[in-house]
Image (cartoon, rainbow, N blue to C red):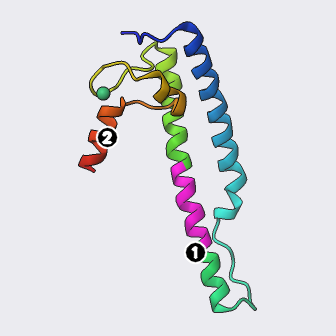
Amino acid sequence: MENGLSAASLTMLGDRLEQLERDLSDLLTTTESDAQPTPLKENASRLSRMDEMHNQSILRANRIVTKNRLIEVRKARVRLAEKDYGICLDCLEDIALPRLKAYPEASLCIDCKSKAETIE
Ligand SMILES: [Zn+2]
């Protein structure tokens, strides 16, 4: 099954996915050390420790979002290679080009995506 995307669109989206994969991996690499538990500083006040823990929990949550997106990007690149790209995994309709431009890793069309989010 093939999406009605033009070769030019597929090339453009493929490039964007490649770039996204690089950016997301870089982001995970650069934030890796900050996400490690820090040894307690001797003179740190209780308040600054709590601040630090709070910041770390935000950073970790962001890293989870980044990791999940990276997984989706990689899956999208596989679909692209297998010519399944741009087809909604749920209803098998084409995913609209503007949506793919905004989220090249999208695996659901906008209708199925909003249905999925309503159920959640
Ligand atoms: Zn769909």
Query: Which quadrant would residue 112 be assigned to in this image?
Result: top left
Verify CB contact (< 8 Å) between mark 2 and mark 1. Answer: no
How many numbered discs? 2
Residue designated by label 2: 114
Picture coordinates of residue 33, whole percent (x, y): 70, 60
Looking at the rendering, which quadrant does residue 89 occupy?
top left
* Residue sitting nearer the eye, 57 or 113: 113
In the displayed structure, would residue 23 be above or below residue 14? below
**Ligand 1: which quarter?**
top left
Q: Residue at x 26, y 40 (%)?
A: 115
Q: What residue type is disc 1 on?
A: His
* Amino acid type at mark 2: Ser
Asked whether 71 falls inside the magenta stretch, the response is no
N-term-proximal mark, 2 vs 1: 1
Q: How far across and down, in percent of the image, does residue 11 sit?
A: 60, 14
Q: Nearer the viewer, residue 22 or 11?
A: 11
Q: Which mark is residue 27?
A: none
Left/right placement of residue 38 relative to residue 117 reads right
Residue ID at (63%, 89%): 47
Query: Residue 54, which numbered label?
Result: 1
Looking at the rendering, the stretch of residues picked out in magenta corresponds to 55-65
Dot 2, how many residues are within 10 Å of its Cα: few (below 14), some (14-19), or many (20+)?
A: few
